[in-house]
Image (tube, rainbow, N blue to C red):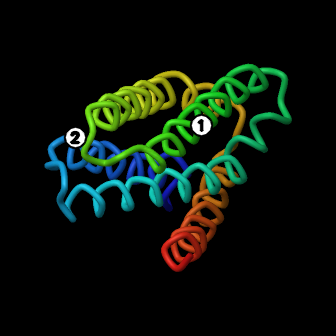
Amino acid sequence: MSETIFEALRESHDRQRALCRKLLRSKAHTAQRTQAFTELRIELAAHAAAEERHLYVPILMEDMGLSPARHALHEHHQMDELVEDLQVLDHSGRSWVASARKLSDKVHHHLREEEKKFFQVSGKILDDVQKVRLAKRYRKEYARMVASLASG
């Protein structure tokens, strides 16, 4: 069988976890910190846009998926706000490190919850053909978003 939406999303989830670790291990006043933050910011934004369009929207259309999808969207919004905060804070300050840790914690919480709960609900709603089709659409949208965010 071809790749499903869940396998495609887990690949991005693994990248997000690694980028969070890289960010938290980075040193103040270094290009490494700036680069790690930029990579994480782009990864989170591209993933969220593609995931919302190609998983959350179909799940929102079903009664069983309404509440879990709304909760996941809310968490995406919370992560967006934390990223915005990090963009304006001094990258070498204590408040930046505390906010980066808070973002990492939120990302890890969201990914765990999504993989353990949301994927199971979604798996009951979507049939096998939809899961494969959504993976292809997700990958295409994700690549488009990464290119767009990296260039601008």
Give the label, 1 or 2, closer to the camera: 2
Which corner quadrant of the image does residue 133 belong to? Answer: bottom right
State whether residue 11 is above or below residue 81.
below
Which mark identifies residue 96? Answer: none
128 or 18: which is nearer to us? 18
State the residue at coordinates (50%, 40%).
85
Q: Return the x and y of residue 102 as percentages of the image width and height.
A: 38, 27
Categorize mark 2 by other alpha carbons within 10 Å: few (<14), some (14-19), many (20+): some
Q: Is residue 72 left or right of residue 111?
A: right
Q: Residue drawn 56% across and 65% down?
A: 142
Rendering coords of residue 110 (x, y %) = 48, 29
Relative to 66, is 74 on the left or the right?
left
Give residue 40's position: percent from left, percent from top: 38, 53
Q: Secondary structure at mark 2?
A: helix
User: Which residue was labeled with disc 2?
Assistant: 24
Q: Is residue 72 left or right of residue 11?
A: right
At x 22% / y 42%, what residue is drawn?
21
Disc 1 residue crowd, few under 14, some 14–19, many 20+, Cα 10 Å:
many
What is the C-alpha distance between the residues marked 1 and 2? 20 Å
Residue that numbered label 1 is attached to: 76
Earlier sequence position, callout 1 versus callout 2: 2
Going by the numbered disc 1, the residue's amino acid type is His
Badge 1 marks a residue whose secondary structure is helix
Give the image location of residue 150, x and y in percent.
48, 74
Of the residues shown, which amino acid type is indicated by label 2? Answer: Leu
